[in-house]
Structure formats: structure tokens, C-alpha cells
Image (cartoon, grey):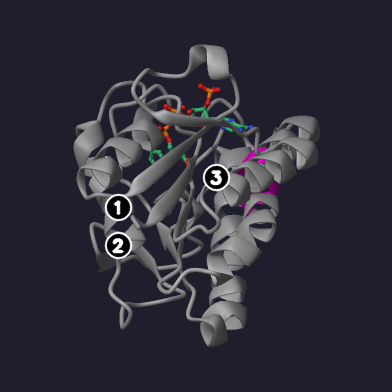
Amino acid sequence: MRDVAVVAGASRGIGREVCRQLSDLGYAVVAGVRDLAKAPPGLDLCALDVASDESVAAAAAWVAERHGRCDVLVNNAAILYDTWARASSADVAEVRAALETNLFGAWRTTLAFLDLLRRSPRPRIVNVSSEGGSLTSMRGGTPAYRVSKAGLNALTRMLAAELRPDGILVNSVCPGWTATDMGEHGGRPVQAGAASVVWAATLPDDGPTGGFFRDGRPLPW
Ligand SMILES: NC(=O)c1ccc[n+]([C@@H]2O[C@H](COP(=O)([O-])OP(=O)(O)OC[C@H]3O[C@@H](n4cnc5c(N)ncnc54)[C@H](OP(=O)(O)O)[C@@H]3O)[C@@H](O)[C@H]2O)c1
């Protein structure tokens, strides 16, 4: 039986390429997309809007029914790279919207899939973060996005500590500036950004947990 990987935010960009790379490695990949009509062909699709409790619960039930377990969960969905905004003049509603998807989305998806992850012999959770959320290099601007990724990194630390006894490895990964819609099609090729994520999805049993990485190398929190 192939290992099962669930990727949230798989309709395009890094998430879509993570699906392709994990498929090539032999995983049974479930591509979580919020709009099935927009989804790319050739993937095993599952409706998954990480901002909706109902959608996330239905997706977990769908994976349970179809596969009976989840070996890898990639929390990749994100919105609102708000380079136009400043913390000192922020629209709090916009910040809240970013948190709903980028932080609470990853959190509720993880909670919904935990039972399925515990059924795996080698469970992994990858929170796709950004160096923009690093407190060490934090500066002004892009407030909704930065605070959502800093929160996501905190979630990684807590989950890693709490889930270590279950053998679940939990890490944050920055894909680097990558040529997607969010990356405004500059930066490195999507294959490289996705490979940074796939590294953490395919860690060996003695691999790290509770870390923040890009290309397999630690980043400062
Ligand atoms: N690109 C970069 O330079 C860069 C750098 C650092 C970190 N990252 C991180 O890498 C990850 C992927 O980014 P990307 O560049 O591939 O972004 P992208 O091209 O904008 O794609 C974002 C993906 O998230 C999905 N999504 C958004 N809200 C969702 C929701 N509520 N439920 C389910 N899916 C949702 C989108 O689906 P729809 O098609 O339905 O909108 C899309 O598939 C993000 O976590 C991002 O913060 C990217």
C-alpha cells in the first residue's frame, strides 16, 4: 500500500508541484483544492477549503473513507502577501482574513487529520511558511502575511513538542522566493520551491522535528 499524502492548496503554484513530485516518488497524493472546477487535470482531487470547518471535516472523512490513513499532510494554502500594507496603518479585517487561512487553516486541517496521521507508521506534517515570518529578520511591512507566518511557526513548535510521542514529525518550511502567482512569477523555478517542501514531507524516522528549514537547511526563527 502506497503512503498517502494530502496537500492543501494544490490547485496551482507550489502546492500543485508538490503533488507532482510526491506522485513521482510513489505517494498516493490527494490534491486538496477549494474549487474543484479550477483544479488541474491528472490529480486525485478532494474539495478542501481550509478556511471552512465543514469543508475540512468533509475532506478528512473523504480521505478516511478512501485511504483509511494519512502519512503526510502538507499545509500549503495561503493568501494575502500584502506588500502594500503597513502594521502601523493596517486594515485589521485583512489581517484577520490572512490568519483565517494561513494560520487557522493549517491548524484546523491538522486537527481534522490527526487521527488519520496517527494511523501512519511514519507520519509527517509540513507547514509551508516563509522567512517573512521570521522574528529574527522581522521588519516593517507585509503585516498580515508576516504575522500569519510567525503564528504558523509557533504552531509548528507546539505541535512538534506535543506530537513527538506519537512519532509525528512537524516542521516549517520556506520554499524561498518562487515563480508562482504569489511570487509574481519572479524568483526561482516552482520545482525548486516545491522540492524544499518535499524534503520535509519525506524525512526519515530519525529526521528533525520542530524546525524551520529552506532546502533542508535551518532558518532562524
Ligand atoms: N511564492 C513564493 O515566493 C513564496 C515564498 C515564501 C512562501 N510561500 C508560501 O508557499 C505556499 C504556496 O504559495 P504559492 O506561491 O504557490 O501561492 P499561490 O500561487 O498564490 O497559490 C496559493 C494556493 O493556495 C490555495 N488557497 C488559498 N486559500 C485557500 C483556502 N482557503 N483553501 C484551500 N486552498 C486555498 C490557492 O487556491 P485557489 O486557486 O483556489 O486560489 C492556491 O492553490 C504558501 O503557503 C506561501 O505563503 C511562497
**Separation of residues labelled 2 and 1 (CA atoms):** 6 Å
* Secondary element at tag 2: loop
Q: Quadrant of residue 79?
A: top right
Please tell me the numbered disc located at residue 198: 1
Q: What amino acid is found at the position of numbered circle 1 in the picture?
A: Val
Q: Earlier in the sequence, mark 3 or mark 2?
A: 3
- Report the span colored magenta: 101-106
Q: Camera-side residue: 141 or 155?
A: 155
Horizontal relation, residue 44 to residue 62: left or right: left
**Separation of residues labelled 3 and 2 (CA atoms):** 22 Å
Horizontal relation, residue 82 to residue 90: left or right: left
In this orientation, does residue 87 appear?
no
Q: Label 3 belongs to which residue? A: 66
x, y (%) of residue 24?
20, 43
x, y (%) of residue 58?
71, 40
Please tell me the numbered disc located at residue 202: 2
Q: Are marks 2 and 1 in contact (CB under 8 Å)?
A: yes
Horizontal relation, residue 29 to residue 117: left or right: left
Q: Camera-side residue: 169 or 101?
A: 169
Position above or below: 82 against 149:
above
Q: What amino acid is found at the position of numbered circle 2 in the picture?
A: Thr
Q: What amino acid is found at the position of numbered circle 3 in the picture?
A: Arg
Q: Residue at x 28, y 27 (%)?
A: 179
The magenta stretch spans residue 82: no
